[in-house]
Amino acid sequence: MQKLGQIQTLQQKLSPQQIQFIKLLQVPTAELSARIEEELEINPALEDTREEEDYNERETNDQDDEPLDDYEGDADDFEDDYGSEHESYEDVDIGDYLHDDEMGGYKMQGDGPSPDEEEREMPLATNDSLTDALLDQLGYLALDDRQYQIGMQLIGSIDSEGYIRRELQGIVNDLAFSQNIETEEEELEDLLQQIQGFDPPGIAARTLQECLELQLKRKNQQDQDVHNALRIISLCFEEFTKKHYNKIEKRLDITEEQLRDAVNVIIKLNPKPGENTSDFARNHYITPDFILRNNNNKLELSLNSKNAPDLRISKSYAEMLDTYDKSSKKDKTLKQAVVFLKQKLDAAKWFIDAIKQRQQTLLRTMNAIVEYQHEYFLEGDESKLKPMILKDIANEIGMDISTVSRVANSKSVQTDFGIFPLKYFFSESITTDTGEDVSSKEVKFILKEVIEAENKRKPLSDDKLEKILNDRGYNIARRTVAKYREQMNIPVARLRKEL
């Protein structure tokens, strides 16, 4: 038998303003401009002050429009959109939207160009995509329409690195089902070999071995080093990838010097021929959110907000609301119009406040990071990095860890020695023999120095690296050495071996 009961619970919910702030906080500077443009489009009460010069012209054009006082629509329909629970016209405080500080706009130092600065358009470089370049070359082959369609399918199967990862039988099935073209693997293989002769060298290969072979076959085969390099890739590819040089010398009956010269030819080849012809859309540019300068050992931090325009409440909307306040006509239609205006003005105020709070939070967080890692930012010496976790900064600025995490995961800072993501400065601590806590960044820095100074003919194993670090006072295990080495993309000792 079912029973009815009451349960009292306590739940935490975020207000729309808090949700808006959280979303804006995690947006990097490069994407903030697009977010602001989106808000400007959906909320006419929000205004970019750079459009002020066009205001008088727009106002003249608006005079021909039908005034809102003569609105003859169905008031019930208007009420359905905004609900009857909205506050009435008499509850609206017009003064909330007419303060001078709101009308003055919101601007921080470094926000966009000043009126005296000349606005310039930035030219964007364009170049053909890999697919376009290959299709152009396909047009030079003497192919009929059917063969051209097959060639287009093969080119369409090439990935961004320049490889065809899909099996030829799968491409045969694709042609049959999608284009009603019957073919066989042999025909695809013949056409594929022609495409593999296109530029860049090595394109349309199915494996790394085939890619390197295609590039070597384009070189002068009379050159002994090229000839030996092709033999190594064709006959001893597995031994080459594992750097079993002794086995290669015995199998191919070549000297160590000949092997060294052939390997020098191989390492100059391009393992990803498609990347050099990637289109402009694949280029990624970093826009730093902070700029940190060292002015005579005095660190100066500024917020890079050039992509954020100057925002303010629309004058026309505020004046419209003031006009309705002074109007003697107080019918239901006018009340609903005022509620609509108030909603848009509230949304504009909330957005401007969220932008303010976003930049204040960013500055507070970055200032705390600069203060914590002050010695590092003075010189850029990785050994000066202190152990620092999100909780340290959260306690310093009196905010939640999740807030610091949103800032650290998506922001970067430009310093005198490079651009770094904020999460670069966070690291775990390791205890030395003296009981001092040091950053894992410092250990990685020393580990990298040791590996770079090793004898490449006899590279150090992880066990030997562990012993060296332990002798220097860093108590870490071999598995930790392996973890740090992998994080720095340093291969194992066998793959670091050189001739």
Image (tube, rainbow, N blue to C red):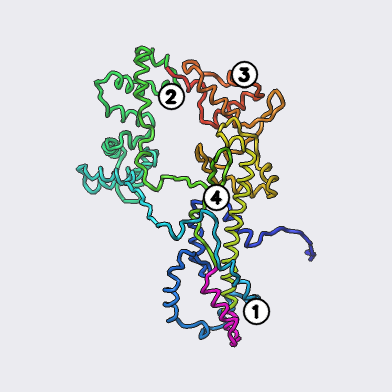
* 395 or 4, nearer to the observer: 395
Q: Could you give the CA–CA distance between mark 2 and mark 3, rounded to whole angstroms?
A: 28 Å
Q: Is residue 235 left or right of residue 426?
A: left
Q: Residues within 10 Å of mark 3 (few under 14, many from 20)?
A: some
Work out whether 379 lies above or below 119.
Answer: above
Query: What secondary structure is found at the residue carrying circle 1?
Result: loop
In the rendered image, residue 199, in percent from the top left (x then y), is placed at: 28, 37
Query: Residue tagged by mark 2?
Result: 241
Query: Residue tagged by mark 1?
Result: 88
Q: Earlier in the sequence, mark 2 or mark 1?
A: 1
Query: What secondary structure is found at the residue carrying circle 4?
Result: strand
Instruction: Indicate the amino acid at tag 1.
Output: Ser
Query: Residue tagged by mark 4?
Result: 303
Work out whether 352 lies above or below 198.
Answer: below
Q: Earlier in the sequence, mark 2 or mark 3?
A: 2
Query: Residue tagged by mark 3?
Result: 467
In the rendered image, residue 133, in percent from the top left (x then y), is placed at: 29, 44
Q: Residues within 10 Å of mark 2 (few under 14, many from 20)?
A: few
* 490 or 404, nearer to the observer: 404
Depth check, mark 2 against mark 1: the one in front is 1
Q: Could you give the CA–CA distance between mark 2 and mark 1, rounded to whole angstroms?
A: 77 Å
